[in-house]
Image (spheres, rainbow, N blue to C red):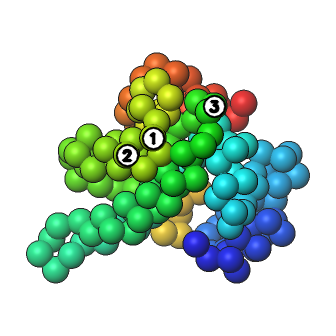
Amino acid sequence: MSESKVRLVESGKSPVLEPGLEELIRQGKQTGRLRASTKLDDAAREADAFLVAVGTPSAKNGSSDLSHLLRALGQLADVLKGVRKFQVVNVRSTVPPGTMRGSVIPLLEERSGRQVGTELGVGMNPEFLREGTSVRDYDSAPFDLCGVSDPRSAEVLKSLYAGN
């Protein structure tokens, strides 16, 4: 986690050069819908959903390097251990088929001590974005593709993407 990037977002600025992103961050800050923090335990108590978008670069053999994603999810799961409200962990990273069932869900359940589908929701909502046109790509997407562990997770994510 980059403290400098978190500080930029908290001040209403974009940590990356992406047309339209800074205005979205500013709007999110003004409405109170967006907060950035390096303190995962604070976020864990307050958030209804966590959007995890971590790079999954290709290894030399062509496979996906999931180490950054699994490390981030493990850190999140550790702080979710004591939280009792229903929350959704939504993976936005591009991952190979079977990663959610084979790696992500077992990791979240083991490290958080929470049962996916009843105590914790999981979603998979891959990004189909290109650098430099991400905001436009997001706004003009013909549909949102989202897989979820349970109906409650679907409702949380529908509400999030509807702007509620």
* Rendered-image quadrant of the C terminus: top right
Q: Amino acid at mark 1?
A: Gly
150 sits left or right of 33 in the view? left
Q: Nearer the viewer, residue 70 or 123?
A: 70
Q: Quadrant of residue 1?
A: bottom right
Q: Residue at 33% across / 68% down in the picture?
A: 67
Residue at which label 3 appears: 85
Q: Amino acid at mark 2?
A: Glu
Mark 3 closeness class: few <14, some 14–19, many ≥20 residues within 10 Å = few
Answer above or below: position of 23 versus 60.
above
Residue 67, which numbered label? none
In the rendered image, residue 9, in percent from the top left (x then y), is placed at 74, 67
The mark that comes first in sequence, 2 or 3, is 3
The mark that comes first in sequence, 1 or 3, is 3
C-alpha span from label 2 to label 1 = 5 Å
Residue at which label 2 appears: 110
Q: Residue at 42% across / 50% down in the picture?
A: 111
Residue 113, which numbered label? 1
Q: Residue at 39% across / 41% down in the picture?
A: 109
